[in-house]
Amino acid sequence: MSYTARPQGFLAQVTTAVRAFLNEPELSQKWTDDKLWPLIVEAWSQIMDDVNGIGENPIFVRFSFTPTNQQKTLLLPGNFGAFSRIYSDETADGIGSETLVPRSRLNPWGGAVLLEGNYLRFEPFLSADTPYILEYMPSEYCPLHLGETDLSDPNASLTTVTLDTDPAEGYFDFAPGAYIGSVIRLLDSPEIDTGPGAYLDFPVQERVISDMDPETHVVTLNNPLDFDPLDGDVGAVTYEVVPFMGKSFAPAIEWRVAYQVAMIEDVEGRSGRPNRLALEYKRTMSKIRLRFANFNRRTGQRFQGDLPGNGRFGWSWGFGSAGGGAL
């Protein structure tokens, strides 16, 4: 028995699932992709806020930058949601040697870090050539699209890729910093039958976009690719830009979008379809909440309470004897 190939990419997966839940035919679609994309972005936004609202293990992302001499402002990543802290990593060991948090605007020593629209303003100025890391909760924004990039382009490298300004699906956002913080996934290469280098198949690459040139649309990746784009004739590669944690939230996004569409078509709910879809959405969200509430098993709600480091007993020394003992 043969099966239809699975949809390629996040957008195709979600839109295909939504139509299946709504029992909408693939031909003569009433809810086309361009009508579903805004609902997908909105659903992901609401789900992210819901998960971060559980409090136990909210989702944080980090954005690295090195200020120039007397830099006054920093353009925030496109998916910036809520500020946590800025810290320097002068020793490059991942441990912050200096932490900056917002102070009052009337503080005589300056406000340190002030939120002003889509910028951060520094008072006093940050030291030049010192690496800093911005830690924040991501927001709902993600300019979803499916496009093609040419890895034989001179701008392509292990850590840089040029985005498609005329994507096959979705849309391209020309706003500066719009793609910073989003995830880019290289899916396949239609020009080669096998994978690059020693790979038998094209290795799907998933990286976070850490920077973008607004003039050339070249984005910088947070980690190098697993293969050198210039090593071999890879050529054109199909890619997609997806939300942070998009794969984890995909099932809930599918049910929520289907529910929203059903509500639009049946406002009064006489068919019973909106209620049925809402029930499946609630079941899926319950699983996601439980997963993230207990994501850190050292501090999660279901970890044993009599172990070192647990808030119930504090730190315990030894092996449980009354007098303690050496570890």
Image (cartoon, helix red, strand yellow):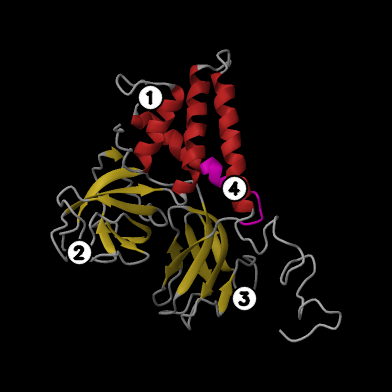
Query: Where does residue 163 sit, x and y in percent of width and height?
Result: 26, 52
Question: Dot 4 corresponds to which residue?
Answer: 51
Rounded to the nearest angstrom, the CA distance separating label 2 from label 1 is: 41 Å
* Front residue (pair 4, 132): 4
Question: Dot 2 corresponds to which residue?
Answer: 197
- Residue 109's tag is 3
Looking at the image, the residue that sits furthest to the right is: 322
Rounded to the nearest angstrom, the CA distance separating label 3 from label 2 is: 55 Å
Residue 50 visible within the image: no
Instruction: Name the image quarter holding residue 215.
Output: bottom left
- Residue 229's tag is none
Rounded to the nearest angstrom, the CA distance separating label 1 from label 4 is: 28 Å
Residue stretch in magenta: 45-57
- Residue 31's tag is 1
Left or right: residue 155 versus residue 142 is: left
Mark 3, mark 2: which one is toward the viewer?
Answer: 2
Task: Name the residue at 57% across, 31% down.
Answer: 280
Classify mark 2: helix, strand or loop.
loop
Mark 3, mark 1: which one is toward the viewer?
Answer: 1
Rounded to the nearest angstrom, the CA distance separating label 3 from label 4 is: 36 Å
Mark 1 or mark 4, earlier in chain:
1
Rounded to the nearest angstrom, the CA distance separating label 3 from label 1 is: 56 Å
